[in-house]
Image (cartoon, helix red, strand yellow):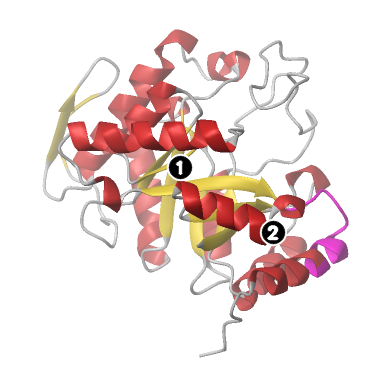
Amino acid sequence: MLFGLLPPYRSGVTADPEWVVPFVTQAEALGFESFYAVEHVVVPVGHAAAYPYSETGRMPLADDCPIPDPLDLLAFVAGHTTSLRLGTGVVVGPHHHPLVLAKRLATIDRLSGGRMTVGLGVGWMREELEATGIEFSTRGRRLDELVVAMQAVWAGGPASFHGEFFDFTDVRSEPQPVHPGGVPVHFGGHSDAAARRAGRRGAGFHPLGLDDATLAAKWALVRESADAAGRDPDTLELSVTMAVSAVDAAAVERAAAIGVHRIVCSTAAVAPQQVSDDLAALADRLGLAPRTAG
C-alpha cells in the first residue's frame, strides 16, 4: 500500500511557502509516497451547486480559503523534494485547453524527473465552470476530448486532433514527459461514467466519498471497462482519500481487500505544528520507512 498526503487546505496555509516547504520535506523524509493538490479556479460566492460529498451540500472550504493553482503548487513542491510523487485530486479538466495543460504537465514531469500524476474530473460546481465560459452540460464530453488530445500530444512527433471542442493539426509540444505514453492520468468522480472513463482511458481511478461496498462495485466496473477496451485491468491503480483520523490498520486492511493501491491521507485543519506532529504519528502508525539522505 502506498500513502500520500493532502495538505490541510482549511487551515489556509497551502499558499504560504514557509509552511509548505517544511510540510513536504517532512513528508518525504518520513516515507510518504506522494503529495496531492486540488483545484478551484474560482469559488462563486454563495454558489447554489451542491457539493456531492457532504450531507449539507456545502463544500468544506470557505469562499475566501486560499486555493493555489495545483500545478504551480506542485512545481514549487517539486523544487523542494527529490522523490515525492506529485498528484492532483483533482484538476477540473473542462477548464483547460489540452495543448496548454499537456505542456504544463509535461514540464513539471520533466523537471521533476518523471514524478507527475494528474487526476482529472468533470467538476461539480456549475457556477465555477460557467465563470470560465464552460457550458455545464458539456463537461463530460470536454473531459473525454481533453484526455485523448493530450495523449496524442504526448505520443511524440506531430500531433493532430479534430473534435467537438478542440481542433489542431500537426503540432509538436516539447518537452515530452519522461515516460513513454505521457503523464499518468487518473480519473476522479464517483459515478458509473467516471468509472468507465477510467477503465477506457486512464491509468487509475480516484473516487471520493464511497463506502466500501460501492467502492468495490465501482472498481469492478473500472476493470470491466478496461477489459472491454482491450486494456489490461491489472495495470490500473485505485486511489482513495481518507481523513488521517480514519487511517488505521483495519482501514488499510479493508482498502487492500478491495484493491486499493494508494491511500491519500487528508490532514486535519489544525495549526501547522499539530500537523507536523500528526504526520510523524501517522507515519509511525503505518510503519513507514524513513528516507535517508543521499
Residue 242 visible in the displayed image: yes
Mark 2 is on which residue type? Asp
Identify the mark at residue 134; answer none if there is no mark. Answer: none
Q: Is residue 97 visible?
A: no
21 or 184, which lies in front? 184
The mark that comes first in sequence, 1 or 2, is 1
Residue type, mark 1 in image: Gly
Q: Residue at x 40, y 65 (%)?
A: 111
The structure residue drawn at horizontal position 43% and vertical position 32%, both measured from the top left corner, is 218
**Residue 167 at x, y percent in the picture:** 22, 23
For disc 2, the neighbor class at 10 Å (few under 14, some 14 to 19, many from 20) is: few
Is residue 217 magenta-colored? no
Q: Quadrant of residue 144?
A: top left
**Residue on which disc 2 sits:** 248
Residue in view at x 27 percent, y 31 percent:
225
Q: Which region is colored magenta? A: 267-277
